Amino acid sequence: MNAPEKLAIPSLQDRVSEEEWQTRVDLAACYRLVANFGWSDLVFTHITARVPGEEDRFLINPYGMMFDEITASSLVKIDLDGNKVEESPFPVNPAGFTIHSAIHAVRHDAQCVLHTHSVNGVAVSAQKEGVLPISQQSIFVLSSLAYHGYEGVALNAEEKPRLVADLGDKNYLMLRNHGLLTLGRTIADAFVNMYIFEATCMIQVRAQAGGGELVRIPQAIVDGAQQQAKTVTKSQGGMLAWPALLRRLDRIDPSYRT
């Protein structure tokens, strides 16, 4: 049996700005972390990030690569229509950019959009009440949560206005019968938001499986969650945990940086 071939990916570090390279490294790290935490869905779903200093240019995964294979140099630069804007040997899936393009077009405050089909997330997205206020994690999600109804596989551009209207100014979006989505001012923020979102859903599914009556957190506590989050993170948001997450990745496999 032949050993699997390693992907030969030429480095782009000397061909892009320092700011773009840092974004590429952080986005590749985000893909690796999603795989590491078990939220990936083979080669499907996407994480996108704005390219610093370039209007409506984004980085996205090469279609067909597993999330734990992605490197800074393999990420593909695309426009708001999902078309490649620079030469790359890797394909992209323009149809898969439908959700992301809709959000990036209107939410200029968000550098990163992260979408998953995790088992726990889809399970809760199928529940009529959605996220329940039953855990400390849930209060942070509920303080900035929106819902969007399922309209089939997200391939139809006509869905975009309804999606962005439902999202509004929120940073957590539950796609009914579909999955989870988070936004972040930074890639670190989007990842940590997803960590909290996924934990919220996992806790809820397990709590419901116990069969007992659930204790709900009062709305007044939910209303104060965003201020509490600023206090807990020293107003650093996801950046408080990000360096430690990168160190974790470096211990496992630092090749995402190449």
Image (spheres, rainbow, N blue to C red):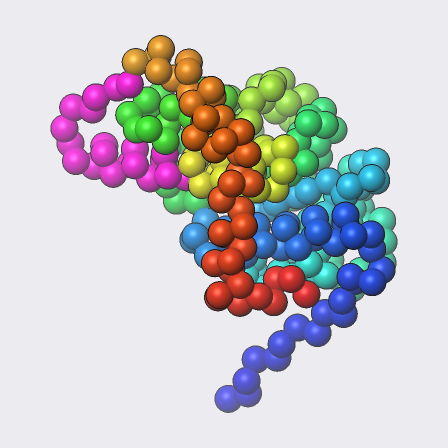
Which residue of the protein is positioned furthest toward the left in this rendering?
212
Count numbered badges in the picture: 0
Most foreground residue, 15 or 240: 240
213 in magenta? yes
Residue 84 visible at all: yes
The vertical placement of 80 against 255, above or below, is above
Q: Quadrant of residue 65?
A: bottom right
Quadrant of the image occupied by residue 220: top left
Q: Which residues are magenta?
A: 198-217
The question of residue 21 being in magenta is answered with no
Q: Is 180 above or below relative to 64? A: above
Give the residue drawn at x 66%, y 31%.
110
For the C terminus, the quadrant is bottom right
Residue ranking furthest to the top: 220
Examine the residues drawn in magenta and state their main secondary structure: helix
Q: Residue at x 47, y 58 (%)?
A: 248
Residue extending furthest toward the front: 234
**Residue 42 visible somewhere in the drawing:** no
Location of residue 189 in the rendering, given as x and y in whole percent from the top left corner = 56, 37
Q: Residue at x 43, y 53 (%)?
A: 38
Picture coordinates of residue 169, whole percent (x, y): 60, 19
- x and y, in percent, of residue 139 in the image: 38, 24
| Residue 96 point in image, percent of width and height | 65, 44
Describe residue 154's horizontal placement relative to residue 200 as left or right.
right
